[in-house]
Amino acid sequence: MFPHPPYAEDQPLAHLILTTHVLHRGFQLGTGIGLLVGTARALFFSSRSSSSLPKPVTARSTPTNTKLVTRLTQVLRPSALGGLGGLALFSLLLPVHMWGKEIIEWQDRSWRLLENRGQVVVDWWSVGGMVLGVGVVALGLGARGRNLGKRERALRVLGGAGVGSLGGVLGLMGWRVLSGSKR
């Protein structure tokens, strides 16, 4: 995706490569934290509601898949907000960390990222999972998405991107374990 010369001193787009990598990892970290929080909240509230008395059945009872959609929303929304938080935090930390560094240091770090075959594979699996996550959420929204506001739809799609990104990395780890591959 990015040009990769044989020597670090010749690395073009060093700022773009390093910034893209850091923001991608910040988004993943924030999504992971949001996913844990959202899952814990969904499990906590589902266990509390299951112990309460059953609600009476009315003529306008909601279909059972509404509960699933609600649970997914409880997980996707915190994942999206966590991803945005991680993105914001890492966008502030990168300039602080790299403040005053020479261009060769940016080039060296970005060159090493591209030179590391394992890192490149993780990045591609992560991006693939992100695309798949966005697709699944977009298909899942379908006709139901019309009733949601733009912000809520965007949060669900963003949450799907983050969860998909993490799923892509987990898929890579599973593939490596099952295939016996160390790379």
Image (cartoon, grey):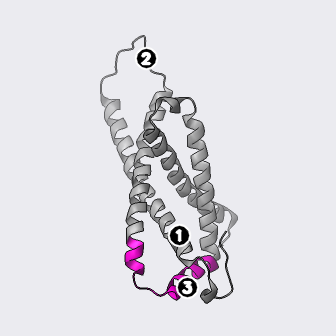
> With respect to residue 27, does 137 lie above or below?
above
| Residue 165 locus on image (x, y percent) | 55, 56
The residue pinned by badge 1 equals 21
Q: What's under tag 3, amino acid-wise?
A: Asp
Residue name at image x 63 percent, y 63 percent: 124
| Residue 175 locus on image (x, y percent) | 65, 61
Does 37 sit left or right of 113 as displayed?
left
The residue pinned by badge 2 equals 61
Q: What's under tag 2, amino acid-wise?
A: Ser
The residue pinned by badge 3 equals 108
Q: Residues within 10 Å of mark 1 (few under 14, many from 20)?
A: some
**Distance of label 3 from label 2 (alpha carbons):** 61 Å
Q: Earlier in the sequence, mark 1 or mark 2?
A: 1
Residue mark closest to the camera, 3 vs 2: 3
- Considering depth in this image, is 131 or 163 the residue closer to the camera? 131
**Distance of label 1 from label 2 (alpha carbons):** 47 Å
